[in-house]
Amino acid sequence: QVQLVESGGGLVQPGGSLRLACAASGSIFRLYVMGWYRQAPGKQRELVADITSGGRTNYADSVKGRFTISNDNAKYTVALQMNSLKPEDTAVYYCNVRRLGDRANVYWGQGTQVTVSS
Protein backbone atom coordinates (compact mmCIF):
# COMPACT_ATOMS: atom_id res chain seq x y z
CA GLN A 1 0.00 0.00 0.00
CA VAL A 2 1.01 3.58 -0.65
CA GLN A 3 -0.10 6.59 1.36
CA LEU A 4 -0.07 10.12 -0.02
CA VAL A 5 -0.34 13.32 1.98
CA GLU A 6 -0.88 16.66 0.25
CA SER A 7 -0.30 20.14 1.60
CA GLY A 8 -0.17 23.73 0.44
CA GLY A 9 -3.67 24.56 -0.73
CA GLY A 10 -5.48 27.75 0.21
CA LEU A 11 -7.02 30.99 -0.97
CA VAL A 12 -5.11 33.23 -3.35
CA GLN A 13 -5.96 36.24 -5.48
CA PRO A 14 -5.93 36.05 -9.28
CA GLY A 15 -2.38 36.38 -10.53
CA GLY A 16 -0.97 34.96 -7.34
CA SER A 17 1.04 31.81 -6.65
CA LEU A 18 0.73 28.68 -4.57
CA ARG A 19 2.93 25.65 -4.13
CA LEU A 20 1.42 22.24 -3.50
CA ALA A 21 3.42 19.38 -2.05
CA CYS A 22 2.75 15.67 -1.83
CA ALA A 23 4.69 13.06 0.11
CA ALA A 24 4.41 9.34 -0.54
CA SER A 25 5.12 6.60 1.98
CA GLY A 26 4.69 2.84 2.20
CA SER A 27 5.50 0.41 -0.60
CA ILE A 28 7.03 2.88 -3.03
CA PHE A 29 7.84 1.88 -6.59
CA ARG A 30 11.32 2.42 -7.98
CA LEU A 31 9.88 3.46 -11.34
CA TYR A 32 6.76 5.55 -10.99
CA VAL A 33 4.55 8.33 -12.28
CA MET A 34 3.40 10.92 -9.77
CA GLY A 35 0.87 13.49 -10.76
CA TRP A 36 -1.60 16.17 -9.84
CA TYR A 37 -5.23 16.09 -10.86
CA ARG A 38 -7.99 18.54 -10.04
CA GLN A 39 -11.74 18.49 -9.80
CA ALA A 40 -13.91 21.57 -9.86
CA PRO A 41 -17.55 21.50 -8.71
CA GLY A 42 -19.73 19.84 -11.32
CA LYS A 43 -16.78 18.82 -13.48
CA GLN A 44 -14.81 15.64 -14.02
CA ARG A 45 -11.42 15.13 -12.47
CA GLU A 46 -8.72 16.15 -14.92
CA LEU A 47 -4.98 15.80 -15.21
CA VAL A 48 -3.00 18.91 -14.34
CA ALA A 49 0.54 17.57 -14.65
CA ASP A 50 2.54 14.44 -14.01
CA ILE A 51 6.17 13.43 -13.80
CA THR A 52 8.01 10.13 -14.03
CA SER A 53 10.76 8.96 -11.72
CA GLY A 54 13.08 9.75 -14.63
CA GLY A 55 11.90 13.35 -14.72
CA ARG A 56 9.74 13.30 -17.83
CA THR A 57 6.87 15.79 -17.43
CA ASN A 58 3.44 16.18 -18.95
CA TYR A 59 1.12 19.18 -18.58
CA ALA A 60 -2.46 20.01 -19.42
CA ASP A 61 -2.63 22.72 -22.08
CA SER A 62 -4.51 24.99 -19.68
CA VAL A 63 -1.57 25.18 -17.26
CA LYS A 64 1.44 25.11 -19.57
CA GLY A 65 3.76 28.02 -18.90
CA ARG A 66 2.13 28.73 -15.52
CA PHE A 67 2.57 25.53 -13.50
CA THR A 68 5.73 23.54 -12.89
CA ILE A 69 5.85 20.01 -11.51
CA SER A 70 8.96 18.65 -9.84
CA ASN A 71 9.93 15.59 -7.83
CA ASP A 72 12.51 14.31 -5.40
CA ASN A 73 13.19 10.59 -5.86
CA ALA A 74 15.12 10.32 -2.62
CA LYS A 75 12.18 11.63 -0.59
CA TYR A 76 9.33 10.37 -2.82
CA THR A 77 7.79 13.78 -3.01
CA VAL A 78 6.23 15.76 -5.80
CA ALA A 79 5.52 19.48 -5.88
CA LEU A 80 3.40 21.69 -8.07
CA GLN A 81 4.37 25.35 -8.34
CA MET A 82 1.38 27.29 -9.57
CA ASN A 83 1.93 30.84 -10.84
CA SER A 84 -0.37 33.35 -12.52
CA LEU A 85 -3.36 31.64 -11.00
CA LYS A 86 -6.78 32.22 -12.52
CA PRO A 87 -10.26 31.80 -11.04
CA GLU A 88 -10.76 28.80 -13.32
CA ASP A 89 -7.92 27.04 -11.49
CA THR A 90 -10.18 26.79 -8.46
CA ALA A 91 -10.63 23.11 -7.61
CA VAL A 92 -9.71 20.36 -5.23
CA TYR A 93 -6.23 19.18 -6.22
CA TYR A 94 -5.33 15.52 -5.79
CA CYS A 95 -1.94 13.88 -5.82
CA ASN A 96 -1.58 10.39 -7.18
CA VAL A 97 1.09 7.79 -7.85
CA ARG A 98 1.25 4.61 -9.91
CA ARG A 99 3.91 2.21 -11.02
CA LEU A 100 5.34 3.19 -14.40
CA GLY A 101 3.43 1.21 -17.03
CA ASP A 102 0.56 0.27 -14.70
CA ARG A 103 -2.55 2.40 -15.13
CA ALA A 104 -4.85 0.02 -13.30
CA ASN A 105 -3.52 0.49 -9.78
CA VAL A 106 -3.43 4.13 -8.79
CA TYR A 107 -3.09 5.56 -5.31
CA TRP A 108 -4.67 8.90 -4.41
CA GLY A 109 -4.24 11.50 -1.73
CA GLN A 110 -7.12 13.07 0.15
CA GLY A 111 -7.08 16.30 -1.84
CA THR A 112 -6.36 19.92 -1.02
CA GLN A 113 -8.59 22.89 -1.88
CA VAL A 114 -7.22 25.69 -4.06
CA THR A 115 -9.42 28.76 -4.39
CA VAL A 116 -8.51 31.65 -6.66
CA SER A 117 -10.68 34.63 -5.93
CA SER A 118 -10.48 38.35 -5.26
Image (tube, rainbow, N blue to C red):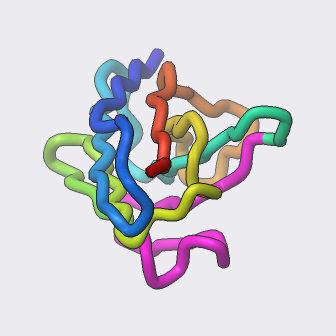
Relative horizontal placement of residue 54, taking residue 64 as reference (left or right): left
Give the farthest residue toward the left: 74
Q: Residue at x 50, y 50 (%)?
A: 35
User: Looking at the image, which is closer to me, 75 or 29?
Assistant: 75
- Is 32 drawn above or below residue 75 in the view shown? below
Q: Is residue 54 visible to the viewer in this orientation of the structure?
A: no
Residue 101 position in % (x across, y down) = 64, 54
Give the farthest residue toward the bottom: 65
Relative horizontal placement of residue 26, taking residue 95 as reference (left or right): left
Q: Residue at x 33, y 19 (%)?
A: 26
- Is 39 drawn above or below residue 56 in the view shown? above
User: Looking at the image, which is closer to me, 110 or 23?
Assistant: 110
Residue 44 position in % (x across, y down) = 82, 41
- Is 6 drawn above or below residue 1 in the view shown? below
Instruction: Answer whether residue 46 is magenta in the image.
Output: yes
User: For residue 38, which quarter of the picture?
Assistant: top right
**Total marks drawn?**
0
In the image, the segment drawn in magenta is 45-67
Q: Is residue 77 visible to the viewer in this orientation of the structure?
A: yes
- Is 48 drawn above or below residue 74 in the view shown? below
Q: Residue at x 67, y 45 (%)?
A: 102
Residue 30 position in % (x across, y down) = 35, 46
Q: Residue at x 37, y 39 (%)?
A: 11
Residue 2 position in % (x across, y down) = 43, 21
